[in-house]
């Protein structure tokens, strides 16, 4: 298995100090990114005891059983797009990580939070990571939200755009009028937290339609961005006839209670790992070839250097 994550898994004697979401990601990554195509619950328990996270196997089994149940629930959402099959207390790899790049990418992005030392070794420039994640979410939403139009603001460090350009573009696409832009057009102003515009027009092309302003947060600091995009600010720069809603996309997977809490904080549509991957239910190869190649190229050096990875 991969090395024990640096965060989220601590010594547990009388209480479980092993975060279930971290344990699930560790198990998935160990199966997906290492050579052995099978992994048993007993293998996970053995490592936890050997690494002195637990003293007693029976106590470790309690937490591992919870993780297997959670993983089974998540994999069932993917149907044909599963990379992992869970049979009782054993897990089998159905597809190599390169064959399911969206799943592998979202999982690897999540691992950056649990293995911060590994993540930092690749530098602090997250431009390409962010662009790849935004492109993946854009393709996912285009397939998931039938009849909707998904538009990227197109901002990046390589081709920066001023907020005033983005505002005018959004207003034009929605047939809305621009508002008071000047107070928000400082030299530092970018896209103001808006990565994707999702809207469902009617044939009459009039206002008053469903609109989501989406933030795509691929980094481990995603919680700091839950308040974005700021709808109060956007309602100042665009004179919406009907106030839009927020949407927030992240590669992390959440336990049910955390998913509910984050939905409340977003106050809109939360797109987590398994919602991003939902097109795979019917089409396991839903990622376009060019994007797939870019993701695989980005992943390869990182997977090779995962802590405990087999050469």
Image (cartoon, rainbow, N blue to C red):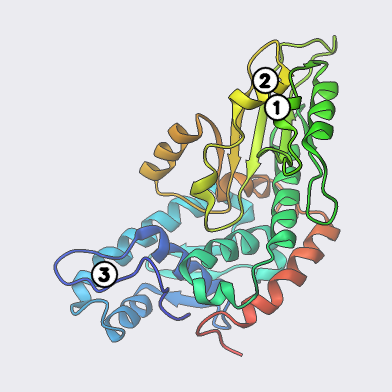
Q: Residues within 10 Å of mark 1 (few under 14, many from 20)?
A: few
Q: Which element is circle 2 on?
A: helix
- Residue displayed at 55% across by 84% down: 309
The residue labelled by disc 2 is 236
The percent coordinates of residue 243 (x first, y second) are 63, 16
Q: Which badge, 2 or 3, is on the more N-terminal residue?
A: 3
Q: Is residue 52 left or right of residue 136?
A: left
Residue at the far bottom in the pictured view: 311
Q: Is residue 297 left or right of residue 54?
A: right
Name the quadrant containing residue 102: bottom right
The percent coordinates of residue 31 (x first, y second) are 52, 74
Q: Which badge, 1 or 3, is on the more N-terminal residue?
A: 3
Question: Is residue 6 something that shows in the picture?
Answer: yes
Q: Residues within 10 Å of mark 2 (few under 14, many from 20)?
A: some
Label 1, label 3: how far apart the Cα atoms are? 58 Å
Q: How many marks?
A: 3
The percent coordinates of residue 239 (x first, y second) are 72, 15
Q: Which element is circle 3 on?
A: helix
Name the quadrant containing residue 258: top left
Label 2, label 3: how far apart the Cα atoms are? 54 Å
The residue labelled by disc 3 is 61
Q: Which element is circle 1 on?
A: helix
Q: Residues within 10 Å of mark 3 (few under 14, many from 20)?
A: some
Q: Which mark is residue 183?
A: 1
Q: Nearer the viewer, residue 68 or 254?
A: 254
Q: Is residue 202 left or right of residue 234?
A: right
């Amino acid at each position: 298995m991969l090395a024990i994550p640096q965060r989220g898994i601590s010594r547990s004697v009388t209480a479980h100090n092993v975060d279930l979401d971290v344990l699930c990601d560790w198990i998935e990554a160990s199966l997906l990114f290492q050579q052995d195509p099978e992994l048993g619950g007993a293998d996970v328990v053995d490592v936890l005891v050997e690494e002195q996270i637990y003293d007693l196997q029976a106590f470790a089994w309690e937490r591992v059983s919870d993780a297997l149940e959670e993983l089974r629930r998540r994999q069932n959402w993917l149907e044909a797009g599963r990379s992992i099959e869970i049979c009782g207390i054993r897990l089998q790899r159905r597809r190599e990580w390169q064959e399911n790049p969206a799943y592998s990418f979202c999982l690897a992005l999540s691992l950056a939070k649990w293995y911060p030392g590994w993540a930092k070794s690749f530098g602090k420039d997250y431009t390409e990571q962010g662009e790849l994640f935004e492109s993946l979410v854009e393709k996912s939403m285009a397939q998931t939200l039938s009849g909707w139009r998904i538009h990227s603001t197109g901002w990046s460090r390589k081709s920066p755009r001023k907020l005033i350009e983005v505002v005018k573009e959004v207003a034009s696409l929605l047939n809305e009028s621009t508002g008071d832009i000047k107070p928000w057009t400082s030299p530092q102003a970018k896209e103001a937290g808006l990565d994707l515009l999702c809207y469902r027009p009617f044939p009459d092309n009039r206002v008053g339609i469903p609109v989501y302003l989406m933030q795509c947060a691929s980094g481990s600091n995603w919680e700091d961005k839950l308040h974005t995009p700021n709808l109060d600010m956007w309602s100042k720069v665009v004179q919406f006839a009907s106030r839009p809603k927020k949407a927030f996309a992240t590669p992390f997977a959440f336990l049910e209670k955390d998913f509910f809490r984050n939905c409340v904080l977003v106050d809109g549509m939360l797109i987590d790992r398994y919602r991003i991957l939902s097109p795979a239910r019917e089409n396991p190869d839903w990622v376009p070839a060019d994007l797939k190649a870019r993701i695989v190229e980005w992943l390869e050096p990182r997977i090779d250097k995962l802590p405990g990875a087999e050469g």
